[in-house]
Image (cartoon, helix red, strand yellow):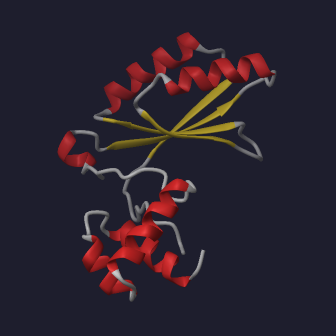
Amino acid sequence: MDSIDRRILTALQRDNAISVADLAEQVGCSRTACWRRIKSLEETGVIRAQVTLLDRSKLNLSVTVFVAIKTSRHDVEWLQKFADTVDSFPEIMEFYRMSGDIDYLLKVVVPDVAAYDSFYHRLIQQIDLSDVSSNFAMEEIKFTTALPL
């Protein structure tokens, strides 16, 4: 990957609807070369998907909860069940295995506290967890999907 590829990726992260002609002009290459580079970046998996970012507040999904989970189970079977359970919840936007005091961290998006309470009860009914700590975000100060290139 060279500097032109990085400029293409940076521009696409800002606006994926940009035309190939405008993108090519912006990064300093021909339309054909730009199109080929985009296709190559898609084929190699650098570009994983093209998505539309939605405004959560306009969709009544303005509550973000970070859920810290501790568990006494660490076997492969339990982890697979946990991963499958997490995958079945559309409210869970992100899922991480952590180092330090907690084992897993979930980012959950819901309309309100009552919806989170319902989510929480459904989660603990499906999987054995030792300790669950919920932290509600008071304000989103920075949000981006753009990677630092």
Relative to residue 137, is residue 133 drawn left or right?
A: right
Relative to residue 95, is residue 88 drawn left or right?
A: left
- Residue located farthest toward the left when viewing the structure as drawn: 58
Q: In x, y percent, where is residue 112?
A: 30, 33
- Residue located farthest toward the right when viewing the structure as drawn: 75
- Residue located farthest toward the bottom when viewing the structure as drawn: 28
Residue 82 sits above or below residue 24 on the image:
above
Give me the residue at 43% from left, 75% from top.
8
Give me the residue at 51% from left, 62% from top.
41
Viewer-proximal residue, 12 or 96? Answer: 12
Viewer-proximal residue, 41 or 74? Answer: 41
Relative to residue 138, is residue 46 drawn left or right?
A: right
Q: Can the viewer see residue 129?
A: no
Q: Quadrant of the image for the C terminus?
A: bottom right
Q: Quadrant of the image for the N terminus?
A: bottom right
Give me the residue at 39% from left, 28% from top.
116
Residue 139 sits above or below residue 126 on the image:
below
Q: In x, y percent, where is residue 141?
A: 39, 64
Viewer-proximal residue, 134 or 31? Answer: 31
Q: In x, y percent, where is residue 18?
A: 26, 69
Image mark count: 0
Relative to residue 14, is residue 100 drawn left or right?
A: right
Q: Can the viewer see residue 99?
A: yes
Residue 142 sits above or below residue 81 on the image:
below
Give me the residue at 34% from left, 31% from top.
113
- Residue located farthest toward the top when viewing the structure as drawn: 125
